[in-house]
Amino acid sequence: MDIGEFREFGKAAVDYIADYFETIRDRQVMPDVKPGYLEDLIPKDAPNNGESWQEVLQDLDRIIMPGITHWHSPNFHAFYPSANSFPGIVGEMLSAGFGCIGLSWIASPAYTELEVVTMNWLGKMIGLPEEFLNCSDGPGGGIIQGSASEVTFIALLAAKERKVAELKAQNTTLTESEIKGKLIAYSSDQSNSSVEKAGLLGSMPMRLLPADENGILRGTVLAKAIEEDKRKGLIPCYVVANLGTTPTCAFDSLEEFGPICQKEGIWLHVDAAYAGTAFVCPEYRYLCRGVEYADSFNFNPHKWMLVNFDCSAMWVKNAKYLVEAFNVERIYLEDAHKGMAPEYRHWQIALGRRFRALKLWFVMRIYGVEGIQKHVRHHISLAKHFSELVGKDNRFEVCSLSMGLVCFRLKGMTHSQKHC
Ligand SMILES: Cc1ncc(COP(=O)(O)O)c(C=O)c1O
């Protein structure tokens, strides 16, 4: 494909996306297709000779569109919101256009530098304490990861390294593998599946403690579990607090968890994947009180903040623990600017990095803080309106309303049938 064809193809693709959004309201949200539908519509092997872009684009309608679930339809109510916006889409396109791999500062300086700046902007926008920001001159900072799942896992690995280092410094008689075999983590039984998965991947049992009737894990329950485990000879290492649980968007109290974790030397991670965007609005920041106790904090602009997947914002109070956990040097990765900017490859699993900061920057600049606040408040007011409508219908009862999430059920269901 030459550059002239690329211009035509690219413009046609943008038109295709614009047409898609103009007609999305009329599309059936869930496709009718059955598993394996696509195989019957597509040749068994890749074409020997290249085809024209026009033919390929035509096949989007014939083959791909019938299997698309329309997450951005106003009639889509499943899972959680998946953010999207035109500035975000264009940021993603341009990032693909540059096509760099930001594996170090020198590999594409703007990649790192814009990420540093946008993560400072974003941290300030949600009212994070200064020590989490790259601009604080301390050891803290922010990075964009691919998903909240990755972040919870990465924070667990950093917590593990910190605990091992701490015990070694205290001249423990345990070997490193004995320490690692005794580590234990905690979260609520309302936390996302990814929290349990982080424990599995990181070989650290994750105790999912019972939340109260409002979906909140109380500090007293956490403290009791920690005491029990210490009596068994285990070493409490990692706690994941939920600010906005997946089932009902309930908020654990960082003011309850924080002092417990501090006393026990436990890494406190905050999973605010969905609801973190609400902290852009000062009136919701009370739900984040106690955040100064956290060691790491995460929310997903790709859920509610108009940035298309993937864009998961992570801040740590001390990046040293990430770097110590993940730093593997090679001569071909050396860079004369070492130490002058964060080397984000040491803060993440992969070596290569995408230019995710570009779409985030576009969204923040084109909407502005006020535009994003307006978007959040609008969603919350729609949820309130919806819950009032449900409340007026005597067939249903509203079980919870938090942020943009309304949980309701048919009246008169038995306990075992109740699924909020
Ligand atoms: C509270 C919470 N944490 C984590 C996740 C996982 O997010 P991701 O897909 O970015 O890993 C979700 C997604 O639903 C969530 O609601």
Image: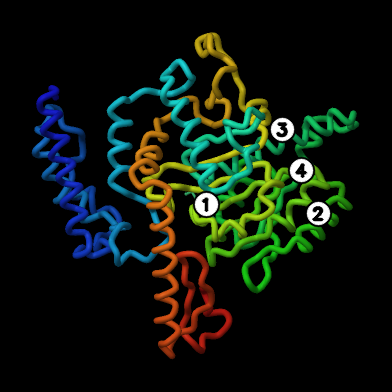
Nearest to viewer (mark 2 / mark 4) = 2
Mark 4 and mark 1: Cα distance apart in space: 25 Å
Q: Marks 1 and 2, how far apart in space?
A: 25 Å
Is residue 150 in view?
A: no
Task: Give percent across and percent down for residue 13.
Answer: 17, 41
- The disc, 2 or 4, on the residue closer to the chain's N-terminal end is 4
Does label 1 or label 2 sit earlier along the sequence?
2
- SS at mark 4 in the image: strand
Q: Position of residue 165 (x, y in %)?
A: 78, 30
The yes-or-no answer for disc 1 within 8 Å of ligand 1 is yes
Amino acid carrying label 3: it is Glu
Residue 326 drawn at (x, y percent): 61, 27
Mark 3 lies on residue: 161
Other-residue count near label 2 (Cα within 10 Å), few / some / many at <14 / 14–19 / ≥20:
many
Quarter containing the N terminus: top left
Residue 419 appears left or right of 74: right
Q: Amino acid at mark 1?
A: Ala
- Tag 4: residue type? Leu
Which mark is in front, 4 or 3? 3
Q: Quadrant of residue 90?
A: top left
Instruction: Tell which circle, 2 or 3, labels the residue nearer the N-terminal end.
Output: 3
- In the shown orientation, is residue 184 left or right of residue 35? right
Please give the residue where the numbered disc 2 appears in the rendered image: 226
Whether residue 384 is visible to the viewer of this picture, yes or no, is: yes
Calculate the distance from the C-alpha at mark 1 to the C-alpha at mark 3: 24 Å
Tell me if label 1 and label 3 are in contact, CB under 8 Å: no
Asked if the residue at label 3 sits under 8 Å from ligand 1, the reply is: no
Residue labelled 4 has its Cβ within 8 Å of some atom of ligand 1: no
317 and 74: which is toward the camera? 317
The circle on residue 273 is 1
Q: Which residue is mark 4?
A: 183
At horizontal 67% and vertical 66% (from top left) the residue drawn is 211
